[in-house]
């Protein structure tokens, strides 16, 4: 048996505030050591921002740490307990293949969870092996870093380490561990777990901890738990609007995959939409389209309703009053989301201010894009540079009339046209992590051990609003295929 080695420093500055919650919420769990860890990807800028020694992390000791063979100083590794509605069905879950090492306190005084994904079995693994394959871990690295560059709140990826051991799925795959960085891993499912298997006091301690960690501006007075619900709804309304604006499809919006922090979490069967269609689904397990692109705002509201249900004992002593308070707040989500989405869509079209007809201008364009099977990202990119002839709608009389309306709307604005163009450039990415480009990078890395394709892709994605000539090739959509693109959860 491989023994776990002693700690390595490298600038780690851990606290373990989550581990000071009641033990109901976690299980102490060391990672299972692996035979031959090798660091294959390190996010050096992120490491530096966390206050870590980049050179020390690139040593053999660093690989040991990222694989779970070593522990940072003051680490208290735990697996977190939570529940969740998976495709609408409630179940007990927990970190079945993830271990939280602790919370890194940065030189700026910020707190970030450092979590290993794929480090072995935990008490919540059920029949799983607690391991992860290289391809899905690299996929999460690419997509989460692309989301960060797009300005979308997200967990981030610090490192990927191969283990030297195979994981068995349908075939034998290369084993790997991802090191994930998050504001926290508190989920809607964490509160569902507390409400179902804990006491009201446990639920209150979790809620107050969450307020201190994510909403310190909320005073711990009588209505603080209603404020927790309100602030969580606000963050989710903003987050989901940002997803929709770039064509991101999460793929598995279970309640355990909704973070209270407002960050995108758990990149399983996620992907970015090429051809615009609200019914787009990539996930191989979403046969009914529950988590389709167009459904994401509705599912977010559904998930938040489950969060509100979990909080009911804290909202009011009278259950009927508690339900009324919760319902009123959940009802506000749609308006908040719609406001963020409209503001973002106006920016994508270079529209300043508000006019009553703006929404119809936007929806009419989207309807045409769907009917003409237009590429979502490239349509807005073409409009940014006033090249409507490069869109799939070019030559359509309907689109020509729409362009006249759009230009007239811009013409009624006080600021110069340069302001509209600048707004569009900063709102419409030149590149997204196109699915075929992601697959190309994963194939090179997993099949041939060639990480240069992934490194080049990450470089292009790191400045999505640069609109440079080097990004042209990465902006091209995939060739037409008879087989629809499918993603898998990676477990």
Image (cartoon, grey):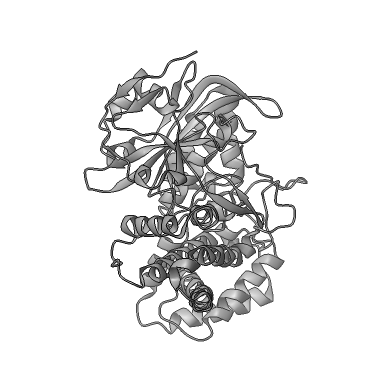
At which x and y percent is residue 478?
64, 46
Q: Residue at x 49, y 68 (%)?
A: 312
For residue 106, side relative to residue 265 (left or right) = left
Q: Is residue 95 above or below residue 263?
A: above
Residue 113 seen in this snapshot = yes
Residue at the bottom extreme of this rendering: 356
At which x and y percent is residue 213?
33, 55
Image quarter where the C terminus lies is top right
Q: Is residue 460 above or below residue 3?
A: below
At which x and y percent is residue 269?
61, 46
Q: Residue at x 39, y 74 (%)?
A: 417
At which x and y percent is residue 212?
31, 57
Front in this rendered view, residue 379 or 196: 196
Q: Residue at x 45, y 46 (%)?
A: 25
Q: Is residue 411 above or below residue 283?
A: below
Front in this rendered view, residue 327 or 480: 327
Residue 272 seen in this snapshot = no
Count of marks, rendered view: 0
Front in this rendered view, residue 215 or 150: 215
For residue 259, side relative to residue 280 (left or right) = left
Residue at the right extreme of this rendering: 482
Front in this rendered view, residue 194 or 62: 194
For residue 288, side relative to residue 194 (left or right) = right
State which quadrant residue 294 falls in. Answer: bottom right
For residue 195, side relative to residue 219 (left or right) = right
């Amino acid at each position: 048996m491989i023994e776990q080695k002693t700690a390595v420093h490298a600038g780690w500055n851990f606290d373990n505030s989550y581990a000071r919650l009641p033990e109901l919420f976690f299980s102490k769990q060391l990672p299972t050591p692996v035979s031959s860890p090798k660091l294959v990807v390190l996010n050096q800028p992120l490491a530096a921002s966390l206050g870590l020694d980049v050179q020390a992390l690139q040593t053999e000791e660093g690989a040991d740490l990222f694989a779970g063979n070593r522990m940072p100083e003051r680490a208290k590794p735990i697996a977190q307990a939570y529940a969740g509605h998976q495709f609408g069905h409630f179940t007990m879950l927990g970190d079945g293949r993830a271990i939280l090492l602790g919370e890194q306190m940065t030189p700026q005084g910020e707190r970030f969870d450092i979590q290993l994904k794929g480090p072995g079995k935990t008490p919540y693994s059920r029949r799983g092996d607690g391991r992860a394959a290289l391809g899905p871990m690299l996929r999460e690295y690419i997509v989460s870093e692309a989301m960060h560059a797009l300005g979308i709140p997200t967990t981030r990826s610090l490192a990927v380490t191969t283990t030297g051991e195979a994981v068995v799925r349908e075939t034998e795959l290369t084993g790997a561990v991802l090191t994930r960085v998050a504001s926290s891993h508190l989920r809607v499912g964490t509160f569902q777990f507390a409400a179902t298997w804990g006491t009201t006091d446990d639920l209150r301690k979790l809620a107050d901890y969450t307020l201190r960690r994510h909403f310190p501006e909320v005073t711990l007075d009588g209505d603080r738990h209603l404020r927790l619900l309100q602030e969580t709804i606000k963050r989710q309304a903003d987050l989901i609007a940002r997803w929709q604006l770039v064509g991101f499809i999460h793929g598995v919006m279970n309640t355990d995959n909704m973070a209270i922090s407002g960050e995108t979490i758990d990149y399983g069967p996620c992907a970015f939409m090429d051809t615009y269609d609200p019914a787009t689904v990539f996930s191989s397990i979403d046969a009914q389209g529950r988590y389709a692109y167009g459904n994401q705002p509705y599912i977010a509201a559904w998930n938040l309703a489950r969060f509100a249900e979990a909080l009911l004992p804290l909202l009011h002593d009278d259950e009927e009053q508690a339900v009324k308070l919760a319902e009123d707040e959940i009802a506000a989500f749609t308006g908040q989301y719609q406001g963020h989405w409209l503001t973002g869509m106006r920016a994508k079209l270079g529209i300043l201010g508000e006019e009553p007809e703006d929404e119809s201008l936007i929806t009419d364009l989207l309807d045409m894009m769907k009917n003409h099977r237009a590429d979502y990202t490239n349509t807005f990119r073409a409009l940014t540079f006033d090249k409507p002839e490069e869109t799939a709608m070019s030559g359509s009389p309907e689109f020509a009339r729409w362009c006249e309306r759009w230009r007239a709307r811009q013409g009624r604005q006080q600021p110069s046209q340069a302001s509209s163009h600048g707004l569009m450039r900063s709102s419409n990415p030149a590149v997204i992590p196109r699915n075929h480009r992601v697959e190309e990078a994963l194939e090179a890395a997993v099949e041939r051990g060639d990480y240069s394709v992934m490194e080049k892709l990450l470089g292009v994605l790191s400045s999505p609003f640069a609109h440079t000539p080097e990004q042209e090739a990465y902006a091209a959509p995939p060739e037409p295929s008879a087989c629809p693109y499918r993603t898998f959860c990676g477990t």
